[in-house]
Amino acid sequence: MRSSLKRGVNIVVNTEPRIRDIKVTSDTITAYLVDGRIVSVPLAWSWRLSEATPAQRARWRLIGDGQGIHWPDVDEDISVEGMLHGVPAQRPRVPKSVFNAQERGNGKSNGRRSHRPRGAQRSTAKR
């Protein structure tokens, strides 16, 4: 933000980039900024949007005064600063323990132990 003084009146001018509108295609995410700039990044920068349906991509809302965009159906947020500075979203890494558990086939694919207290016996009654 920048402030200027004119005849004793303080005028605050917002110079931060803000999004006015957004368009998502099968290849790109294009942001139309309030100041007239158009910023376009590859859709692959957002793995969540890449895997989303066209209907999910079309349902978005601005964050704040246009500092970013939120897609509620896929829980994705992209900031205008991230688009301008070239910061793609990183896919979360799956811990090795998850892969090891899946390979063993023990059904504990999340790597956590059972919630059964120590010493508690599993019921043998038929359900």
Image (spheres, grey):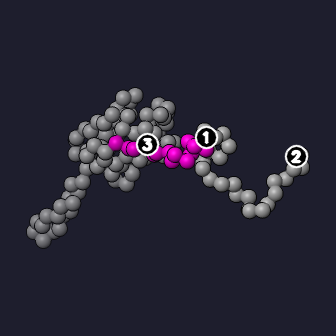
x and y percent of residue 65 in the render? Answer: 34, 53
Q: Amino acid at mark 1?
A: Gln
Q: Amino acid at mark 3?
A: Arg
* Residue 92 placement, left or right of 15: right
Check if residue 106 falls in the magenta segment.
Answer: no
x and y percent of residue 59 in the render? Answer: 47, 39
Is residue 64 placed above or below 44 in the rendered structure?
A: below
Point 68% across, 43% down: residue: 106
Magenta stretch, residue numbers: 88-101
x and y percent of residue 1 in the render? Answer: 21, 60
Say which mark, if any, is on residue 26. Answer: none
Q: Residue furthest bottom?
A: 8
Q: Nearer the viewer, residue 115 or 106?
A: 106
Q: Amino acid at mark 2?
A: Arg
Check if residue 96 falls in the magenta segment.
Answer: yes
SS label for mark 3: loop
Point 13% across, 64% down: residue: 4
Would you name the residue on which mark 2 appears? 127
- Disc 2 or disc 1, which is closer to the eye? 1
Is residue 41 placed above or below 121 in the rendered structure?
A: above
- Local packing at callout 2 (Cα closer than 10 Å; few below 14, some 14-19, many 20+) is few
Would you name the residue on which mark 3 appears? 91
